[in-house]
Image: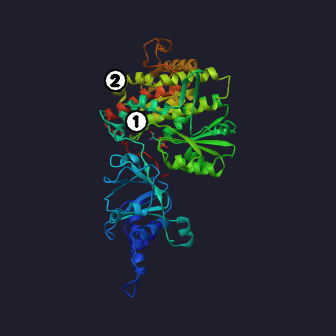
Amino acid sequence: MVLKETLLRHGYRFESDTDTEVIPKLAKFVYDRLSEGTSVNGEETQEVTFSQVVMEVMRQLEGAYALIFKSSHFPSELVACKCGSPLLLGVKDAAEPEMKMDQFINNDLLHDKRQGRPKEYFLASDGSAVVEHTKKVLVIEDNEIAHIKDGSLSIFKFDTAKARKIGGVPRPASVQRALSILEMEVEQIKKGKYDHYMQKEIHEQPDSLTTTMRGRLIRGGESKMKSVVLGGLKDHLRTIRRSRRIVFIGCGTSYNAALAARPIVEELSGVPVTMELASDLVDRQGPIYREDTAVFVSQSGETADTLQALEYAKSHGALCVGITNTVGSAIARGTHCGVHINAGCEIGVASTKAYTSQIAVMTMLALALGDDSISSRIRREAIIDDFFDLPSKVREVLKLDIEMKELANLLMEEQSLLIFGRGYNYATALEGALKVKEVALMHSEGILAGEMKHGPLALVDETLPIIVVATCDATFSKQQSVIQQLKARKGRLIVMCTKGDAPSLCSSGACRFIEVPHVEDCLQPIINIVPLQLLAYHLTVLRGYNVDQPRNLAKSVTTQ
Ligand code: AGP
């Protein structure tokens, strides 16, 4: 607002209400000012450089951004910079042999013209956008400037805090940076035989879960030991076990995944777990202590709210653990330790395979934390056994695709859909509803079944469709009673139950069923979400909405 008002006072006119439009106009304003300052009596004294203009713009900006500047004043030049939001530079050199990981490059090496080797540069917010051109990337850091001029690249570090303090732009320092290699294959970003990325990613889950588990679950050997190895956490498990509490922090689907894992983490670690939506923690400036372990869950690793909560928790001295899908992301770099979920590149805005892999990783975290307890050994071994069966069980539940399409056909004209769950599957209710509203643009609400009588029951009639998750676990009899009460109000019920349980839940034929395979209770949310993902997908296609880029949403929410 302040910048816009200044520009308005100087005669600039705006065509939109976006913050973004302020930036190029500010750049023009800065350019004119700097140009005036470099001419004495009409004589040019010193040339204004493009990076000088951009640094002055950066000095005046607040908040998160990733920007690329082009200007008719500086033909054949491009300047990129970032603060908070992700930005990476891909470097392609067809003539050059493969560069080794961590090979340090400096500006000289990147100066194409001098080396006589043509290079192509790609700027993007995510590796998936450049991987089809090159795997060699350089992650641009906050307050860095990448300046491409006549085919040569220079990278500068610019201290914005100092610039603000002194009210001008200090001399930027040239920096050396390491190139890294993207761990991603081009096939991962192609739709292949599928119509949409969301559909592909739902069907990929047997494989993504296998990759998530690979090398981490151990069964067999001479001692017939069953255990879990999480390399990124092994030196920190003692500290986590001794924490006063574990705080799970995330947004949207990542929060839901943490909620699904919460009971097993509490059960096996004995440490109380509290849940925090990242934005709410920051808004409240909620208490975080040095004795806490704060676990940051994020697919992208770049979500602005989660990042802000991370800075907040770090400043309060908590041990910060990252659970992300993106190697080299801001959360992966900013946490003290962590685990990559290795679900593979997720492109659809609706998170699907990352959700199931996040639950798998947090369940493995629970197993690792409980590893020193003899009393829970049988339980842990049963979970590990079911982990090994998980990909085939997910493959089995994916066969419900046609059934879910039929259900979507029945529900496509509806205004609203309620989903009731409890225990491990409270998260399933929340996540199923999030998927439906996010892509199918249909109102949907996930409700804790234990809260039914405290308000939601008033909504129940013979028209409103309700999904009740009632798979076999310790809360089964309570869900039986919920179903009875909903039936008594003539509720239009769709019951998700374990294969073979349908008659004990509703024998009158009044309910429709979604029957799923059984696994250990803590892994059941991984199975149960799949039919709901399929339902959301088919609803979206039938209602004619954009599956992979839902209205108003972005894959990575890098602004607040
Ligand atoms: C998921 O389908 C959503 N697009 C959204 O809720 C997402 O999970 C949330 O923005 C958090 O993203 P992150 O996991 O990348 O931090």
Camera-side residue of 47 and 537: 47
What label does residue 442 carry, if any? 1
- Mark 2 vs 1, N-terminal side: 2
Q: Residue at x 40, y 75 (%)?
A: 48
Instruction: Look at discs 2 and 1 and give the one toward the viewer.
Output: 2
Camera-side residue of 465 and 184: 184
Residue 66's place in the image compared with 327, above or below, is: below
Could you tell me if residue 445 is visible in this image? no
- Distance from disc 2 to disc 1, alpha carbons, whole Å, reads 21 Å
Seen from this angle, which residue lies furthest bottom? 41
Does residue 560 appear to the left or right of 150 in the view shown? right
Residue 220's place in the image compared with 187, above or below, is: above
Could you tell me if residue 238 is visible in this image? yes
What label does residue 125 carry, if any? none
Disc 2, SS: helix
| Residue 71 image position (x, y, % from top left) | 34, 67
Camera-side residue of 391 and 315: 391
| Residue 341 image position (x, y, % from top left) | 49, 37
| Residue 90 image position (x, y, % from top left) | 38, 53
Mark 2 burial class by Cα count in 10 Å: few <14, some 14-19, many 20+ = few
Task: Residue 511: name its quadrant.
Answer: top left
What kind of residue is marked 2? Ile
Q: Is mark 2 within 8 Å of ligand 1?
A: no
What kind of residue is marked 1? Met
| Residue 398 image position (x, y, % from top left) | 39, 25
